[in-house]
Amino acid sequence: MSSNYFKSHPDKEGKFGEYGGSYIPEELTKEMNKINDAYYSISKSHKFISELRSIRKHFQGRPTPVYYCNRLSNKYGGRIYLKREDLNHSGAHKLNHCMGEALLAKYMGKKKLIAETGAGQHGVALATAAAYFGLECEIHMGEVDMAKERPNVVRMEILGAKVVPVTHGLKTLKEAVDSAFEAYLKDPVNTIYCIGSVVGPHPFPMMVREFQRVVGIEAKEQFLEMTGELPDNIVACVGGGSNALGIFSAFLEDKECKLHGVEPAGRSFKKGDHAATLTFGKPGIIHGYKCYLLQNDKGEPDPVYSVASGLDYPGVGPEHSMLKDWNKVEYTSINDKDCIDAFYELSRLEGIIPALESSHAVAYAIKLAQANPTKSILVNLSGRGDKDIDFIVEEYGLPEVK
Ligand SMILES: *Cc1c(COP(=O)(O)O)cnc(C)c1O
């Protein structure tokens, strides 16, 4: 792999090998090209870079620490470290790309940020960025999701965002995407669409990766300083794949570092019971780009499920699709039960309550540690679990305190 990797992936058409690209109506292509041009001319400027650096330091609280899990490692073997994205402002890695997208919007003279949200995490991060920059914010959300994720709806409203209920179809994420795109196309001059992961048409998979690379750059330097060597294993959960690419990107050229992407195996491997896209999917097209996709015979997305709502997506980032074909990353999965066990283990052994999404990565790290007790493991702890506590205790109960 050449050091030119980031310049040549994606290529000029926004392709990662056969994946990615842009399968969208012509009117949308024009807007995506404008965003792409703006990204190249603005985000490489000294002014943009220094403003983003200052935001990361003073508003987000970066760099986030790398932490050695002493008690967890003693119990399971191995040496387990966490990159603490749960300590990033607003409690997850999502703010890394939302602040970047919103800063780009400001430089482009946009007045309003538009997005969809499923569980509400992307909506809350974007509403946070909009408040910081004094931009309007409109979040489209299915009515069903709004009822389920009431606290996040309230958070967005407290932050000054307008939450638009989507009332057609299944009233969940897919309809919310359509609704947000429609609203965006009504006024593409004053508004910008902000995607929540390394997915969607070009240039979003590339832009979101670039804004997340800070995670890996920091983590590599911190890990080297703490231990004098590189980690043997790097583990991250994969929904769309932004937190995983954020940390993997710094280690793609280090042959001694094994990269592990963890998808949700949900309740079972039956259709509709999981969202392990890279394990069971086949190449297809969703939301304007090509990727591995859980799909039926007609190429329509299959229903998906995970206990972690941030991971239940039938597609996956095009770059992950390519890295899978290259065997550069090992993609694996963790089921709900192991995820919940890891959630409690990290809480009780280390005093860190992880997001259910991140708990998938912790669960896989525990398995790796048991199998390879002499190796080191760096986990991207993508978010904190405060948002999940009511649900967990209601659905799974509290394990007895020993
Ligand atoms: C949204 C979310 C994810 C999944 O998104 P990726 O783009 O795959 O990173 C993972 N962890 C947390 C805490 C999230 O909020």
Image (cartoon, helix red, strand yellow):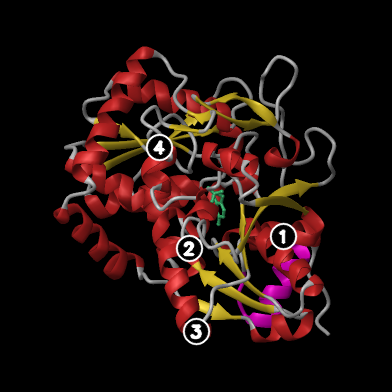
Q: Residue at x 46, y 60 (%)?
A: 250
Q: Residue at x 24, y 33 (%)?
A: 37
In the depicted structure, whether residue 239 falls above or below residue 219: above
Of discs 2 and 3, which sits in the foreground? 3
- Could you give the CA–CA distance between mark 3 and mark 4, rounded to whole angstroms? 34 Å
Within-10-Å neighbours for mark 1: few <14, some 14–19, many 20+: some
Q: Quadrant of residue 132?
A: bottom left
Task: Report x, y in % for residue 307.
Answer: 72, 50
Lower position in the chain sequence, tag 2 or tag 3: 2
Lower position in the chain sequence, tag 2 or tag 4: 2
Q: Which residue is mark 1?
A: 392
Query: Which amino acid, by three-letter code, is at mark 1?
Result: Ile
195 falls in the magenta region: no
Kind of element beneath mark 1: helix
* Dots 3, 4 in contact, CB < 8 A: no
> Label 1 CB, ligand 1: below 8 Å?
no
Within-10-Å neighbours for mark 4: few <14, some 14–19, many 20+: many
Task: Report x, y in % for residue 275.
Answer: 71, 41
Lower position in the chain sequence, tag 3 or tag 4: 4
Q: Which residues are magenta?
A: 340-353
Q: Which residue is mark 4?
A: 204
* Dots 1, 2 in contact, CB < 8 A: no
* Majority SS type along the magenta span: helix
Residue 170 placement, left or right of 61: right
Of discs 3 and 4, which sits in the foreground? 3
Of discs 1 and 4, which sits in the foreground? 4
